[in-house]
Image (cartoon, rainbow, N blue to C red):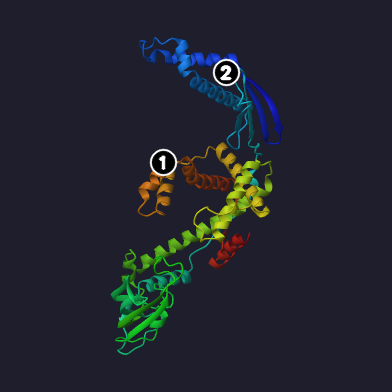
Amino acid sequence: MQVKETQNDGLQRGYQFTLPAADLAKAVDAKLKEAQPEVEMKGFRKGKVPMAMLKKQFGPRILGEAMQDAIDGALKDHLEKSGDRPAAQPKVEMENGETWKEGNDVVVNVTYETLPAIPEVDLTALSLEKLTVPAEDAAVTEALENLAKSSQSFEDRKKGSKAKDGDQVTIDFKGFVDGEAFEGGAAEDYPLVLGSNSFIPGFEDQLVGVKAGDEVKVEVKFPEEYGAPHLAGKDATFECTVKAVKAPKEAEIDDELAKKFGADDLDGLKKQITERLEAEYAGAARAIMKRSLLDQLDAAVKFDLPKSLVEAEAAQIAHQLWHEENPEVQGHNHDAIEPTEEHKTLAERRVRLGLLLAEIGQKAEVTVTDQEMTQAVLRAARQYPGQERQFFEFIQQNQAAQQQLRAPIFEDKVVDLIAEKAKVEEKTVTKAELEKAVEALDEL
């Protein structure tokens, strides 16, 4: 195999591989001889089929295999010798492929972008700030009050009392569209909390002020996007009988409330809340430190970027942001989304940092363990209740999906490695100061 360089411009590489016809013929003969002992053909004993007949019967297929093996082997050898790491799958094109005939040399053009050489970074020169936020008493009290509110019960109001927003009314109701009752539009002794927005818009508002024993007709319009197509956009009337009006009563913040949430007593519940809040604060603080770390790396290191990776990343960013701005479009049946300069700038940052972190991680032999991957799969599977088994099978069979789960784990481990080498100053701040720092991240 002869190899000739045809392009060397920045990260672009081009090579021409020439496979002599004689070498290819030898490879075909070798494959046929290897297969001959196992071949059976009518009129011949097993292993006794003449080579000429084997070549006529299997020659074209074996020739294709030999060509592919030779090209794959040549490309592998070339990459090992050159040290090039293609940014994407190399493009391989056979020259004169349509007019090529057996007996001619095979000429193949190979092009690719190579990954750049990543410069060394002095990680000890990085200066990071690690924020610590203690759980304040006010935050613990607020969390307790929210738990008490979520555990509230309802007590009957005095006879004749009118229902207020936040009250619970017990009703029998029956719904009609175009004068006819519709399936699923009726219930008895239904407990409805006014203001919960659990019914059709406007329904609960019309029950504010009712009393036990009232008969009320509620007039509403089903939303245009309502889940049941035969009801979407239709006017409806609900005949309601109010059977009870109850006022909310928050649970007492005591040991009984604590037991409802798995704690032994109120002190135990406060401890759980404190630990949860501080874990949340620590997560936010880590995000702030990580952003600072990445910003410093991005400013400190510059190198050429593979155009193909930047374009792919920019397209993905543009597509993702478009769907966030157009949540009503569920599929991908829409016009092409052209990345903006802002998308391209962000893509360059992501590609640069991705390559840099990968280089640092590989040199430090950072790996993602099987246990870490299993935990990641289990966490992701929770997003598909009832379909966990199908999700597991999908992950097992899809290398790209596995990489999507592995990548953030690898990145976080590399970030932790860098933070260990950097200069880190610990600083205690308030919850308000932490929130302000998080808001600043969103503005960048």
Could you tell me residue 327's position as x and y percent?
A: 52, 60
The residue beneath circle 1 is: 396
Q: Which residue is pictured at 61% across the width and 43% down the height? A: 309
Could you tell me residue 302's position as x and y percent?
A: 69, 44
Q: CA distance from mark 2 to mark 1?
A: 42 Å
Pick the front one: 307 or 159: 307
Pick the front one: 369 or 404: 404
Could you tell me residue 35's position as x and y percent?
A: 43, 16
Q: Which quadrant does the N terminus fall into?
A: top right
Q: Is residue 250 visible?
A: no
Q: Earlier in the sequence, mark 2 or mark 1?
A: 2
- State whether residue 201 is above or below residue 17: below
The residue beneath circle 2 is: 102
At numbered mark 2, what does the secondary structure look like: helix, strand or loop? loop
Dot 1 amino acid type: Gln
Q: Which residue is pictured at 55% across the width and 26% down the height? A: 72
Q: Is residue 340 visible?
A: yes
Q: Which quadrant does the C terminus fall into?
A: bottom right
Dot 2 amino acid type: Glu
Looking at the image, the residue that sits furthest to the right is 9
Left or right, residue 343 beside residue 38: right
- State whether residue 436 is above or below residue 342: below
Left or right, residue 325 beside residue 15: left
Could you say which quadrant of the image residue 417 lies in? top right
Looking at the image, the residue that sits furthest to the bottom is 160
Pick the front one: 437 or 71: 71
Q: Nearer the viewer, mark 2 or mark 1?
A: 2
